[in-house]
Image (cartoon, grey):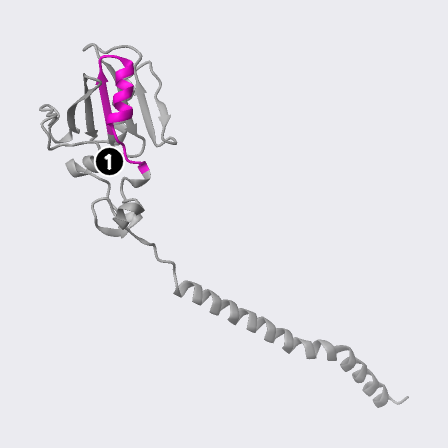
Amino acid sequence: MTEPARARHGLGATLKRWRTPIVLLPLFAALVYSGTVGAQMLWGETRATPTASPTVTCWDGTEDTEEACPEPTGVAGLRWVFPSFRPNTDACREVVYEDAGSTGPLEYVCRVRVAGTKARVRYSERSNLQRGLNYFGKRYDGFDPEPVAAGSRLAFRSDEPFKNGTYEVTVAYVEHPFAVTVNAVNERLRDRVLRQSVNLRPARYLSVRPPEDDEA
């Protein structure tokens, strides 16, 4: 075989060996390009249509997202958190702490009567959540608080009478600065007043109105 023939034979063998990769390379490049463009289009569509937070009715009647609804506050807020609280009746009066100034709690004490016996209910908005919980912890020193309402509140109870001769229980929200305290002449009456005369709104509906209120 002449040298040119061997050269042609070698070139032909080389082309045969590389023909398949040469043909497949553009096809592979096209697939990669299509996949990249498709992914970019899909990502672009996802980013272009973010999910908006739903609008709810806040406790004060305003419309906003749940995250933007404000915490209840003031007498209206206290009335919302505790539906049993009636500030405009003769049975309730505001508690004034002259030495606390503007940093003191907003607090009302209300007289109630159960089974012919008087008791006292105190509704409060603490000026600071953690300080309020610390205060109750010290007041009921020696008595561990009981988690209630799926852990959203703490019930502080004393098995002994206080200096004024009454038995006392306080229920405080864990993540909101609100609490209610009941004083009565005995433990049985105290617990009955808390159960029958005090209404506490569920913690999940302190900042937003429940669906049934929206429909009303």
In the rendered view, tell whether residue 174 sits above or below residue 22: above
The residue located at (26%, 31%) in the rendering is 199
Residue that extends furthest to the right in the rendered view of this protein: 1
In the rendered view, tell whether residue 152 sits above or below residue 159: below
Magenta span of residues: 179-203
Q: Nearer the viewer, residue 129 or 167?
A: 167
In the rendered view, tell whether residue 64 sits above or below residue 74: below
Indicate the position of residue 160 as horizontal and vertical percent values.
Answer: 28, 10
Q: Quadrant of residue 50?
A: bottom left
In the rendered view, tell whether residue 50 sits above or below residue 66: below
- Tell me the amino acid under the disc marked 1: Val
Q: Nearer the viewer, residue 129 or 10?
A: 129
Q: Nearer the viewer, residue 192 or 145?
A: 192
The residue located at (53%, 69%) in the rendering is 36
Q: Is residue 139 visible?
A: no
Residue at label 1? Answer: 81
Indicate the position of residue 168 as horizontal and vertical percent values.
Answer: 25, 17
Residue 175 in the figure: left or right of residue 8: left
Q: Is residue 37 visible?
A: yes
Q: Is residue 185 magenta?
A: yes
Indicate the position of residue 205 as horizontal and vertical percent values.
Answer: 30, 41
Residue 51 in the figure: left or right of residue 102: right
